[in-house]
Image (spheres, grey):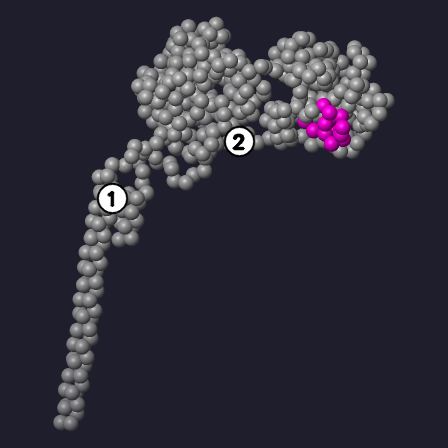
Amino acid sequence: MGLLLSVSVFLAFIYDPLNPGGLGLEPPIIEHRVETPELDPEILDQIEDGDRLSRLVVEAVPLSHLLEKSLQVVPSVAKALGLSKEPIPMARLRANPDAFRGHYLGYGGILRYLSPGREGHPIDGYHVREGWIETDDGEPVLFYISGSSSTRGPSPEVGEYVRVEGFFMKLRDKHLPDEVNQAPLLVGPEIYPDYKLWDSVEKLDPTILAGIEDGTYADGEWSGFAEMESYLLDSQDIPLWHLTSYVLNQQERISPAEWMKIEPIASKEAFDQFRRSTPSSRNELRGRPHRILGSFIQGRTHEVAANPLGIEAWTEAWVQVRDIGGQLLPVWIPKRLQGLQRNALINCRAFFYRLMAYEALEGDFLYVPLFIASDLHKLEPRPEHPIVGIMRIVVVVVVGGIMLIFFSMNRRMKIQRIDHEQSMILRRRRRREKSGQLTGLRIDA
């Protein structure tokens, strides 16, 4: 009876067939955790910049120490080290350089000089490069960075606008190639291209989208799919930024009513149109809006470097679509996600970017369409019809009536059993008494 009552209460008040996973699980959004390099304070104590003579010297041991530690810094680590969006004012830095020694700072400006690599780097395979930039305020910032043959992309050219990030080592004076006094010296992993924010992209450029290469499917085999295996951090480039800017623009222009007119990806044919398309026809699909109805499974957030959209973090989300056999679809969102629970129902308003290859748990590679969306919109259940509440009350009344009937029947059977047992006890007692009287009569005789 207890089991019946428990099941009835669960069905009436707890079970929700539209949201099978919403039973108090924490949001499965993984924030990429990082470890920050630790600087040796005894080595930093060897740095001096209190007078002009000491500012003309670059201490070799502290420089090697900072070059080695800076190689551990990526955008997420830089943020964990306290890198600020706004640069530290020069006057504040010069007034008390000891307070900022070893802090991770960043400045943007025009690259004025970048030396070729020289020996002396503490890590094999790297060389030391130095240079300086001129900030928007006309202030010089000197830097040392690590160079190697494996560095991705071409080196910035003198005259380009770049960003320098690194550990603040000291204030520095120099005579060549120009006179520099009390300029901050940063030691970092590399210099980055810096971008002025783009205007919103209102129309996609086919020439940019044509640069996306995501494989060809023929005779049951894939070929030329190197870019399909590129994940979020490796894809930070102009095609992704261009399409993302367009997505953010369109999300503001397409009304919710217009979104509802777009058919969701809910059939094998709709799913296969991406995978079976040729590269040229796939270019026509890029940037088209689609609706994805499914369950949010997992998300992972990544910090990213400077970009022309001002995006600080991306979330790599996975949505499971039951209508296409439980297939997982990746969706990249240019922000952090908050408050989503595992299996939360999602009505995702997404735009096709490219194909993506990922390795499943069984070891097989799966090829799926990859989408970009401004957010994951939680699918709110329809308002409950009044009849549902009435039916719940009826269920409780019926179950309560059944429980009352069973309770009454059980009580009646218990009373009858007690009465029967008492009757049997009295009957046995009478028999014993009667048997004793007969025995006494025979002895007297």
Image point (77%, 18%), residue name: 120
Query: Toward the viewer: 115 or 161?
Result: 161
In which quadrant of the rendered view does residue 126 lie? top right
Image point (78%, 16%), residue name: 180
First in sequence: mark 1 or mark 2?
2
User: What mark, if any, has residue 31 been given in the picture?
Assistant: 2
x, y percent for residue 342: 42, 34
x, y percent for residue 243: 47, 14
x, y percent for residue 313: 53, 25
Query: Toward the viewer: 273 or 264?
Result: 264
As shown in the figure, which amino acid type bears the numbered disc 1? Arg
Q: Is residue 222 visible?
A: no
- SS for dot 1: helix
x, y percent for residue 259: 34, 20
In the orientation shown, which residue stands out farthest toward the bottom? 444
Quick check: 53 left or right of 216? right
Image point (58%, 21%), residue name: 305
Image point (17%, 66%), residue name: 416
Q: Which residues are magenta?
A: 90-104
Q: Which residue is mark 1?
A: 392
Which is more foreground, mark 1 or mark 2? 1
Q: Is residue 357 visible?
A: yes
- SS for dot 2: strand
Quick check: 21 left or right of 192? left
| Residue contact at pointers 1 and 2, CB within 8 angstroms | no
User: What mark, if any, has residue 190 been given in the picture?
Assistant: none
- How many numbered discs sit on the rendered protein? 2
Q: Is residue 74 magenta?
A: no
Residue 13 position (above or below residue 428) = above
- Majority secondary structure of the magenta segment? helix
Q: Residues within 10 Å of mark 1 (few under 14, many from 20)?
A: some
